[in-house]
Amino acid sequence: MKMEGGSTPNALLGLLSLRPMSGYDIRQMVAQSIGHFWSESYGQIYPGLKRLAAAGLVEKKTERNKGKPDRNLYSLTAEGRERLHEWLKIPVSDEVARNELLLKLFFGAHVSTSVNRDHVASNMEFHQRALKVYTATAKQLRKEEANDPNLSYWLMTLNYGRHYSVAMLKWCRETLAELDEIESKGKRRR
């Protein structure tokens, strides 16, 4: 069965495989977990849940709480779980990443070296912070989710982020050194 919405429905099925959740819960889970490598906004989540429910892949139950708004909880149906299993078996498609830093650096000769340097330094700071987050998250997961059968897989994805940030930090240092060299050559020519 082909679903509209790209990979959003599959991401939602995967998240709901963890436990029943509301759209708000899903957005919070995205921010805490897959948001480091996959984004889903409220504008994608709620229509996606509606399509999944219409297709019979999830079911919605409304919790009514006195004095609070109703809360819609979504959970996988047997068909939804089967759909998730089938999607997980499909080979991963190659994607070309969109990277604004690289795009700006590619055209960097049109601005001063200091502008390029600022972009790279900002990226370097981002990855330094990311490494701290990955370390803290891994420690927290090992402590709080030690018995969860998903732990090894969560740590694999987290380790990818850690390796990526380490590589990006190396690239940033090399690029900053190259920018320094470009700047010093320009000063010598004057």
Image: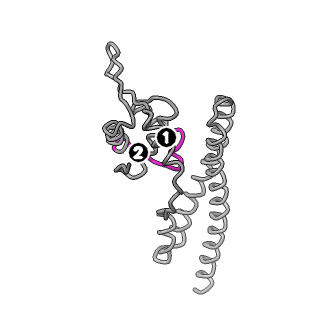
- Along the line of sight, the residue nearer the viewer: 132 or 112: 132
- Residue at position x 60%, y 87% from top? 189
Q: Tell me where residue 29 appears, x and y as whole percent.
A: 49, 36
- Mark 1 or mark 2, earlier in chain: 2
Q: Secondary structure at mark 2?
A: helix
The residue stretch that appears in magenta: 32-43
Q: Secondary structure at mark 1?
A: helix
Determine whether, in the image, residue 131 is placed left or right of residue 118: right
Q: Residues within 10 Å of mark 1 (few under 14, many from 20)?
A: some
Furthest-top residue in this view? 66
Say which quarter of the image contains residue 180. Answer: bottom right
Q: Residue 40: say if magenta.
A: yes
- Residue at position x 45%, y 34% from top? 78
Residue at image mark 1: 14
* Quarter occupied by the C terminus: bottom right
Q: How is the image coloured?
A: one colour
In the image, residue 159 sits, relative to residue 94, either above or below, namely: above
Determine whether, in the image, residue 78 is placed left or right of residue 60: right
- Residue at position x 62%, y 37% from top? 150
Say which quarter of the image contains residue 176. Answer: bottom right
- Residue at position x 56%, y 63% from top? 120
Mark 1 and 2 residues: CB-CB less than 8 Å, in contact? Answer: no
Determine whether, in the image, residue 117 is placed left or right of residue 107: right
Q: Tell me where residue 19 appears, x and y as whole percent.
A: 50, 30
Tell me the kind of residue under disc 2.
Pro
Q: Tell me where residue 12 appears, x and y as whole percent.
A: 44, 41
Q: Residues within 10 Å of mark 2 (few under 14, many from 20)?
A: many
Q: Tell me where residue 152 appears, x and y as whole percent.
A: 67, 40
Tell me the kind of residue under disc 1.
Gly
Q: Residue 162: say if magenta.
A: no
Residue at image mark 2: 9
In the image, residue 67 sits, relative to residue 99, either above or below, namely: above
